[in-house]
Amino acid sequence: MARSEAKAKKAAEEIMDISENRNAQVEGMECDLTSLRSIKAFSDRFYKKNIPLHMLLNNAGTFLPPYDFTEDGFEVTVGTNYFGTFYLTHLLMDKLKQTAPSRIVFQASLFEHLGHIDWKDLECKRSQESGVFEYATSKLEVIMLARELNKRLQGSGVECFISQPGLAHTPLYRKSDHKKLSTWLVDAAQWVYGQRAPQACLSLLFAATEPSLQGKGGSYYGPPFVYLAAIHIPFVTGWNTGQREPGNVYTRDQVAWKHLYDETTNLINGKLKEKNIASPLPVVDQILIK
């Protein structure tokens, strides 16, 4: 899944190039998380394929992009990383239930420590930039979503997990706005301390596939919370797959989880109605009653 058909096709080809299973079938599909309309179109195409969905890895996102808003009126960072992820996950929920036991993994970040929820401006319309604090807030909201959703999915066979990669040396920073000092600082740090992608993805893959995690939904995995220790240390077992606890107070506030979930549902439903994109999004409690 990628923002354009060309990028999706390229990603599928790259996966096949490194795959040891030459009989594997890999298909890339277009899905732009900045657009509720694009997400709905992707979901419709996916359901028509009538294939199972055993795990959903919510890894896509943006970091320090040029200041902008999505076509639906969200600041682009929270619109992509949180609202787009929220909508996509809910559209695919029926398919995840059909193939249970299944898992949803949400990719978080150490930056969640800096996140703050402005309950009067969840869309971040008053933000003056698409910067570090917008990114931190989007990742905080992702953790809150994962934990609230896991509560609501109890007994469904679908579990939610959270992973974070530490500081990763990936092309993500090349796509950031290099007019920002913070972009240069993080980019420099990832060259010195960042883990390579094969190590940085271990927490995500562990949360998605480790059998011993069955029944432990809502838990959080990744390298230790020491920024300069996010480098890969050879021969240290479990460095990237240890169970951690996020630092932001909201990640332990169950009342805040529910409030954020309800407000997000209302906001997205308002956008869907305004643009005549789709019928209202059912909350997970309603999905489970079906």
Image: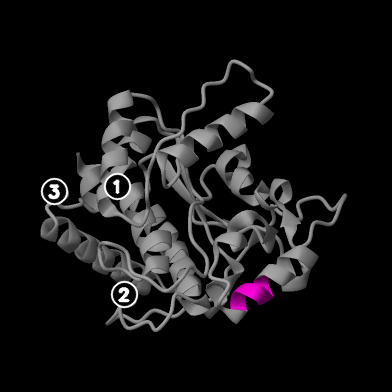
Going by the numbered disc 3, the residue's amino acid type is Ser
Is residue 251 shown to the viewer in this render? no
Q: Residues within 10 Å of mark 3 (few under 14, many from 20)?
A: few
Local SS, label 1: helix
The residue that disc 1 covers is 38
Going by the numbered disc 1, the residue's amino acid type is Ser
> Furthest-top residue in view?
23
Residue under the point 53% across and 72% down: 112
Q: Distance between the residues labelled 3 and 1?
A: 15 Å
The reply to whether the C-beta atoms of the residues labelled 2 and 1 are less than 8 Å apart is no
Magenta span: 182-186
Residue 78, compared with residue 118, is above or below; it is: above
- Residue 95: image quadrant is top left
In depth, the one of 87 and 220 nearer the eye is 87
Residue under the point 68% across and 59% down: 168
Q: Which of marks 2 and 3 is nearer the N terminus?
A: 2
Dominant secondary structure of the magenta stretch?
helix
* Front label number (2 vs 1): 1
The residue that disc 3 covers is 279
Q: How crowded is mark 1: few (under 14 residues within 10 Å), some or many (20 or more)?
A: some
Going by the numbered disc 2, the residue's amino acid type is Leu
The residue that disc 2 covers is 122
> Furthest-front residue in view?
179
274 left or right of 283?
Answer: left
214 left or right of 87?
Answer: right
* Count of numbered circles on the image: 3
Q: Where is residue 77 in the image (x, y as percent from the top left)?
A: 42, 67
Residue under the point 32% across and 83% down: 126
Is residue 109 shown to the viewer in this render? yes
Q: Earlier in the sequence, mark 2 or mark 1?
A: 1
Q: Earlier in the sequence, mark 3 or mark 1?
A: 1
